[in-house]
Image (tube, rainbow, N blue to C red):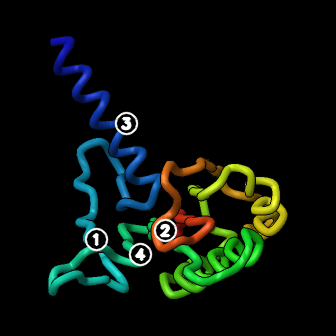
Amino acid sequence: MEKLERRSTLKKLFAGIAGFAGFGAVSSANAAPATLEKKANNITTFQDMPLFSGSTQMGNLVFIAGKGAHFEGDIKAHTDHVLKELEKELIKAGSSMEKVLKVSVFLADLNDYKAMNEVYKGRFGAKPPVRTTVATYGGVPGDSLVEIDCIAYV
Protein backbone atom coordinates (compact mmCIF):
# COMPACT_ATOMS: atom_id res chain seq x y z
CA MET A 1 0.00 0.00 0.00
CA GLU A 2 2.80 2.43 0.93
CA LYS A 3 4.58 1.71 -2.38
CA LEU A 4 1.38 2.43 -4.34
CA GLU A 5 0.85 5.72 -2.49
CA ARG A 6 4.44 6.76 -3.16
CA ARG A 7 4.06 6.02 -6.88
CA SER A 8 0.83 8.01 -7.02
CA THR A 9 2.47 10.93 -5.22
CA LEU A 10 5.47 10.83 -7.55
CA LYS A 11 3.20 10.71 -10.62
CA LYS A 12 1.33 13.78 -9.39
CA LEU A 13 4.58 15.58 -8.60
CA PHE A 14 6.10 14.91 -12.03
CA ALA A 15 2.83 15.71 -13.80
CA GLY A 16 2.76 19.05 -11.99
CA ILE A 17 6.38 19.77 -12.85
CA ALA A 18 5.83 18.79 -16.47
CA GLY A 19 2.80 21.09 -16.71
CA PHE A 20 4.66 23.96 -15.05
CA ALA A 21 7.69 23.58 -17.31
CA GLY A 22 5.53 23.70 -20.42
CA PHE A 23 5.72 20.00 -21.19
CA GLY A 24 1.98 19.87 -21.79
CA ALA A 25 -1.07 21.09 -19.98
CA VAL A 26 -2.01 18.91 -17.01
CA SER A 27 -5.44 19.63 -15.62
CA SER A 28 -5.58 16.70 -13.20
CA ALA A 29 -3.40 13.87 -11.95
CA ASN A 30 -5.10 11.47 -14.39
CA ALA A 31 -4.80 13.67 -17.50
CA ALA A 32 -2.37 12.45 -20.14
CA PRO A 33 0.40 14.96 -20.93
CA ALA A 34 0.64 16.26 -24.48
CA THR A 35 2.95 14.27 -26.74
CA LEU A 36 6.34 15.92 -27.00
CA GLU A 37 8.79 15.60 -29.79
CA LYS A 38 12.45 16.51 -29.69
CA LYS A 39 13.36 19.02 -32.36
CA ALA A 40 17.02 19.12 -33.47
CA ASN A 41 18.55 22.08 -35.33
CA ASN A 42 21.83 22.58 -37.18
CA ILE A 43 22.94 18.94 -37.06
CA THR A 44 26.67 18.39 -37.56
CA THR A 45 27.66 15.13 -39.24
CA PHE A 46 30.88 13.16 -39.03
CA GLN A 47 31.63 10.51 -41.64
CA ASP A 48 28.03 10.73 -42.89
CA MET A 49 26.57 10.09 -39.42
CA PRO A 50 24.82 12.67 -37.21
CA LEU A 51 27.24 13.77 -34.48
CA PHE A 52 25.49 16.58 -32.57
CA SER A 53 22.96 19.38 -32.97
CA GLY A 54 23.55 23.10 -32.58
CA SER A 55 20.39 23.17 -30.51
CA THR A 56 17.54 20.93 -29.52
CA GLN A 57 14.11 21.81 -28.30
CA MET A 58 11.50 20.00 -26.25
CA GLY A 59 8.34 21.76 -25.25
CA ASN A 60 9.26 25.31 -24.39
CA LEU A 61 12.87 24.51 -23.45
CA VAL A 62 15.79 25.01 -25.82
CA PHE A 63 19.25 23.54 -25.23
CA ILE A 64 22.12 25.29 -27.03
CA ALA A 65 25.30 23.31 -27.73
CA GLY A 66 28.63 24.62 -26.53
CA LYS A 67 30.08 27.39 -28.67
CA GLY A 68 33.78 28.15 -28.93
CA ALA A 69 36.02 30.72 -30.63
CA HIS A 70 38.42 29.11 -33.07
CA PHE A 71 40.71 32.00 -33.96
CA GLU A 72 43.70 33.82 -32.50
CA GLY A 73 42.75 36.21 -29.73
CA ASP A 74 42.58 36.79 -26.00
CA ILE A 75 39.91 35.62 -23.56
CA LYS A 76 37.90 38.82 -23.97
CA ALA A 77 37.70 38.46 -27.75
CA HIS A 78 36.82 34.77 -27.42
CA THR A 79 34.15 35.39 -24.77
CA ASP A 80 32.55 38.16 -26.84
CA HIS A 81 32.49 35.94 -29.95
CA VAL A 82 31.04 32.96 -28.07
CA LEU A 83 28.29 35.03 -26.46
CA LYS A 84 27.33 36.48 -29.86
CA GLU A 85 27.18 32.95 -31.32
CA LEU A 86 24.98 31.79 -28.43
CA GLU A 87 22.66 34.74 -29.02
CA LYS A 88 22.37 33.91 -32.75
CA GLU A 89 21.46 30.31 -31.93
CA LEU A 90 18.92 31.39 -29.32
CA ILE A 91 17.25 33.77 -31.78
CA LYS A 92 17.08 31.00 -34.43
CA ALA A 93 15.30 28.85 -31.84
CA GLY A 94 12.81 31.63 -30.99
CA SER A 95 14.41 32.60 -27.68
CA SER A 96 16.76 35.31 -26.41
CA MET A 97 19.58 35.99 -23.98
CA GLU A 98 17.02 37.28 -21.46
CA LYS A 99 15.27 33.88 -21.49
CA VAL A 100 18.37 31.86 -20.59
CA LEU A 101 17.94 29.85 -17.40
CA LYS A 102 21.29 28.04 -17.07
CA VAL A 103 24.78 28.66 -18.45
CA SER A 104 27.87 26.45 -18.31
CA VAL A 105 31.24 28.10 -18.93
CA PHE A 106 34.34 26.02 -19.67
CA LEU A 107 37.65 27.88 -19.47
CA ALA A 108 40.93 26.61 -20.85
CA ASP A 109 42.68 28.50 -18.02
CA LEU A 110 41.07 29.47 -14.71
CA ASN A 111 43.31 32.56 -14.66
CA ASP A 112 41.00 33.95 -17.40
CA TYR A 113 38.00 33.95 -15.02
CA LYS A 114 38.09 37.67 -14.16
CA ALA A 115 38.56 38.84 -17.77
CA MET A 116 35.82 36.48 -18.99
CA ASN A 117 33.44 37.93 -16.36
CA GLU A 118 34.18 41.47 -17.57
CA VAL A 119 32.77 40.58 -21.00
CA TYR A 120 30.04 38.25 -19.68
CA LYS A 121 28.41 40.67 -17.22
CA GLY A 122 25.16 42.22 -18.34
CA ARG A 123 24.81 40.06 -21.46
CA PHE A 124 21.78 38.18 -20.11
CA GLY A 125 19.72 41.16 -18.93
CA ALA A 126 18.74 42.31 -15.45
CA LYS A 127 17.91 38.78 -14.25
CA PRO A 128 20.97 36.70 -15.14
CA PRO A 129 20.78 32.90 -15.32
CA VAL A 130 22.41 30.51 -12.90
CA ARG A 131 25.91 29.63 -14.02
CA THR A 132 28.58 27.00 -13.52
CA THR A 133 32.16 27.86 -14.46
CA VAL A 134 34.95 25.29 -14.57
CA ALA A 135 38.47 25.09 -15.91
CA THR A 136 39.01 22.13 -18.20
CA TYR A 137 41.87 19.71 -17.97
CA GLY A 138 43.74 19.73 -21.29
CA GLY A 139 41.99 22.79 -22.72
CA VAL A 140 38.83 23.45 -24.68
CA PRO A 141 38.42 21.66 -28.07
CA GLY A 142 39.50 23.66 -31.10
CA ASP A 143 41.98 25.78 -29.12
CA SER A 144 39.21 28.08 -27.89
CA LEU A 145 39.95 29.82 -24.60
CA VAL A 146 36.30 29.44 -23.58
CA GLU A 147 33.27 27.33 -24.48
CA ILE A 148 29.77 28.19 -23.31
CA ASP A 149 26.47 26.33 -23.55
CA CYS A 150 23.04 27.18 -22.17
CA ILE A 151 19.45 26.20 -21.52
CA ALA A 152 16.66 28.69 -22.22
CA TYR A 153 12.93 28.83 -22.75
CA VAL A 154 10.94 30.05 -25.75
Mark 2 in CB contact with mark 4 (< 8 angstroms): no
Secondary structure of the residue carrying tag 3 is helix
Q: Position of residue 16 (x, y in %)?
A: 40, 44
Residue of label 4 = 55
Residue ID for mark 3:
13
Q: CA distance from mark 2 to mark 4?
A: 9 Å
- Check whether the beta carbons of the residues at disc 2 and disc 3 lie within 8 A of each other: no
- The numbered mark, 1 or 2, whose residue comes first in the sequence reads 1
Side of 119 where 15 appears, left or right: left
Give me the residue at 22% from left, 27% from top.
Answer: 7
The secondary element bearing badge 1 is classed as: loop
Q: Quadrant of residue 123?
A: bottom right
| Badge 2 or badge 3: first in the primary sequence | 3
From the top left corner, tell me how far across and down residue 120 is, in percent.
Answer: 76, 65
Quarter of image, res 11: top left
Residue linked to disc 1: 38
Q: Nearer the viewer, residue 57 or 50?
A: 50
Residue visible at 47% across and 52% down in the picture: 20
